[in-house]
Amino acid sequence: MRFGLTILPEHSWSVAAPMWREAEQMGFDHAWTFDHVTWGGLPDSPWFGAVPTLAAAAAVTDRIGLGTFVSSPNNHHPVQFMREVLALDDISGGRFLLGIGAGGDVDSRIMGEDLPLRDRTARFHEFTGLLDRLLSEDHVDAEGRFYGARDVRTLPGPVRGGDTGNRVPLVVAANGPKAIRLAVERGDGWMTYGGNVDTDDEWWALVASLSTRVDEALADAGRASADLDRYLNLDSAPTFTLSSAGCFEDAVGRAADLGFTDVITHWPRPSDPYRGTREVLDEVVSDVIPRLR
């Protein structure tokens, strides 16, 4: 099991920089930040951009993976975003994890869009396919319903460990059947938040059903389960995972039983959402995570 920590981009950098350093010092495998114009969970909070935040985080860390949680067509064009992705991957020395998803209603509305769900899903598929090509090829041409690209140069290309043919990993957030198939077809990883339900038991049942859908999609695609990393956002359950060390340990065990390779929690905040204490985070880091690796 690998462990991730999300740091919301709500803090000025003088406050946030020590948090990113500590995430690495604590031994987390990867750290993430939300990529929104405004997040519905904290609509009145200060909010900073994900791309410059991760570039700054790369400069104050050496080892930890750094990811968007998640980027979407709501506020990115694939051609423009490809340049930012290549820069982040270069600055971080190949540590960037590109989390992508269809995006939520708040950003879509703020950006002046009124697309029905069917069209937003279709746009996400087109966005993902073109972005995958832009991160894998040069001289890219495309003419789609939502995006166009005309002889796009993609130099210097994704350089990971000196291998220009190894593109930035795509971690595709998916819950619906079409999106899950997309994650299996295009992704190096699948990510889910489960869904919105009233009880923890209902949430785990939903996560289990999604994991089964991924198994079925992998089988249909003739792809081995081991080829797809599986990321679970633990903190979409009704109970915040870091409410206690015992709660975190139980959640990680259940995630492992369902085949997840990676779990992600959030830096505790003094108020909702993710209300918790630093003491619990420290206990999890010093005692629970070392036993569960």
Image (cartoon, rainbow, N blue to C red):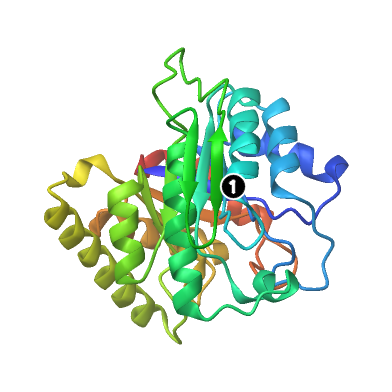
- What residue is rendered at 44% in x and 18% in y? 164
The residue closer to the viewer here, 129 or 205, is: 129
Q: Residues within 10 Å of mark 1 (few under 14, many from 20)?
A: many
Task: Name the residue located 80 percent from the left edge and 58 percent from the top edge.
Answer: 47
Along the horizontal axis of the image, is 280 left or right of 56?
A: left
Residue found 51% across the figure and 25% down from its top: 158
Residue 103 in the image: state x and y as whole percent: 56, 66
In the displayed structure, 128 sits above or below 178; it is above
Q: Quadrant of the N terminus?
A: top left
134 or 51, nearer to the observer: 134
Residue 13 percent location from the top left of the image: 84, 42
Q: Mark 1: which amino acid? A: Trp
**Toward which corner of the image does residue 106 lie, by quadrant?**
bottom right
Residue 75, horizontal then vertical, whole percent: 67, 58
Image quadrant assignment for residue 58: top right
x and y percent of residue 176 in the render? 35, 71
Image quadrant where one finds the C terminus: top left
Residue to which mark 1 is pinned: 32
Tell which residue pokes out farthest to the bottom in this image: 198
The mark tally for this picture is: 1
Residue sitting at the far top: 162
Instruction: Judge whether 176 appears above or below 184 on screen.
Output: below
Q: Residue at x 68, y 69 (%)?
A: 107
Q: Secondary structure at mark 1?
A: strand
Left or right: 116 as drawn, with respect to 12: left
Please indicate, yes or no, whether residue 261 appears anywhere in the rendered image: no
- 174 over 69 or under it: above or below: below
- One can see residue 163 in this view: yes
The answer to whether residue 69 is above or below residue 251 is above
